[in-house]
Image (tube, rainbow, N blue to C red):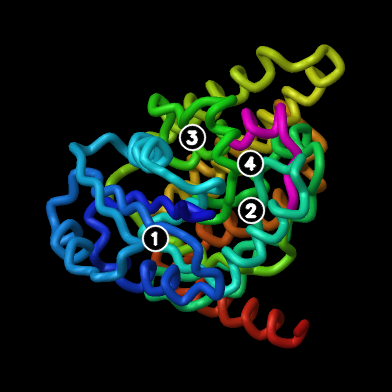
Amino acid sequence: MPKVSVVIPAYNAMPYLPETLDSVFRQTYDDFEVIVVNDGSSDKTEEFVSQILDPRIKLISQANQGLAGARNTGILNASGEYIAFLDADDIWEPTKLEKQVKVLDENPAVGLVYTWVAYINEQGKSTGKIFKNQVEGYVWPQLTEHNIVECGSVAMVRQICFEKIGLFDRNLGSYVEDWDMWLRIATSYDFKVVKEALVHYRQRSNSASKNWEAMAQSFAIVIEKAFATASPDLQVLKNKSYGFTYLCLAWKPLQSLQKDYQKSREFCQQALVYYPGLRFSQEYIRLSIAINLMGCLGADGYSKLLPLFHTMRRVKLALQK
């Protein structure tokens, strides 16, 4: 029985999957199994994984069920005491499993341990952005403002959490189903953080147009679910949660290939309606600058500036070390 089950949902993942799996097999902690859920891929994902000779890897192929459905299949087939999730295009640092296992072994009240996250671009190069969330213990109030786990490749969770809380909600869209799950776990379990950037989160542009209103609706569903059972003293956080959510949503149109800065501005305005105090936050100021730059320079001009911003962040990061 392995200590850790690594669950990797894979849908047409071949451009990145070999590098992702390599980061798993380079872990300093080796008491794990790897469950690759081939979620209806039309590329060579199934063929590639089936040829890997390492006995720790298990391939499950299914008709496409989406990210939440693929993760649920992994959970239901997991043997480990702890479950670690890894998206098929992200990369782990070699000590990630070792350090997270140590935290869970030493803290029986903790249900989930997360790490800091470093952003990389589609080519795997650092953007210089690192999310360094610090919150531990009872994190539910802070989690209603921001998904402190940041991405689906970060969390290591006790198997018993899913037995108590249930599986991922397949009715929710990508990213939002993560936030929903962590909120549900946070109602019953403490969180801990490893204060190192042990996950490289790949930022990928999507050529398909986005239904931003549908995404906003999914966020609203999560918020309403979370506060439906919250105590009266926590209900005051609801508008704040909506405000931070719309601020988060405002980045999405800027990060798509369409670069819809008008939609970003609209989301910003909605954020202030719910929580006017956001106007003075660093994130709101950064977002406003980005929207205005795109409005002045156009999508092409803004895109040409991004590599410069990434270089400046990398230099700043190197100077801080």
Q: CA distance from mark 3 to mark 2?
A: 24 Å
Nearest to N terminus: mark 2 or mark 4: 4
**Which residue is labeled 1 in the image?**
204
Q: CA distance from mark 3 to mark 1?
A: 19 Å
Q: In the rendered structure, which amino acid carries the disc numbered 2?
A: Leu
**Which residue is labeled 3 in the image?**
177
Q: CA distance from mark 1 to mark 2?
A: 19 Å
Nearest to N terminus: mark 1 or mark 2: 1
Q: Nearer the viewer, mark 2 or mark 4?
A: 4
Q: Residue at x 22, y 55 (%)?
A: 12
Q: CA distance from mark 4 to mark 3?
A: 18 Å
Q: CA distance from mark 2 to mark 4?
A: 8 Å
Task: Please indicate whether residue 300 sits to the left or right of residue 44 in the image.
Answer: right
**Which residue is labeled 2 in the image?**
287
Nearest to N terminus: mark 4 or mark 3: 3
Residue 25 lies, in percent from the top left, at 42, 72
Q: Are marks 2 and 4 in contact (CB under 8 Å)?
A: yes
On residue 247, the disc is 4
In magenta, the rendered stretch is 182-192
Q: In the rendered structure, which amino acid carries the disc numbered 3?
A: Glu
Mark 4 crowdedness (10 Å alpha carbons): few <14, some 14-19, many ≥20:
many
Q: Secondary structure at mark 4?
A: helix
Q: Nearer the viewer, mark 4 or mark 1?
A: 1
Q: Residue at x 35, y 52 (%)?
A: 35
Residue 59 lies, in percent from the top left, at 25, 53
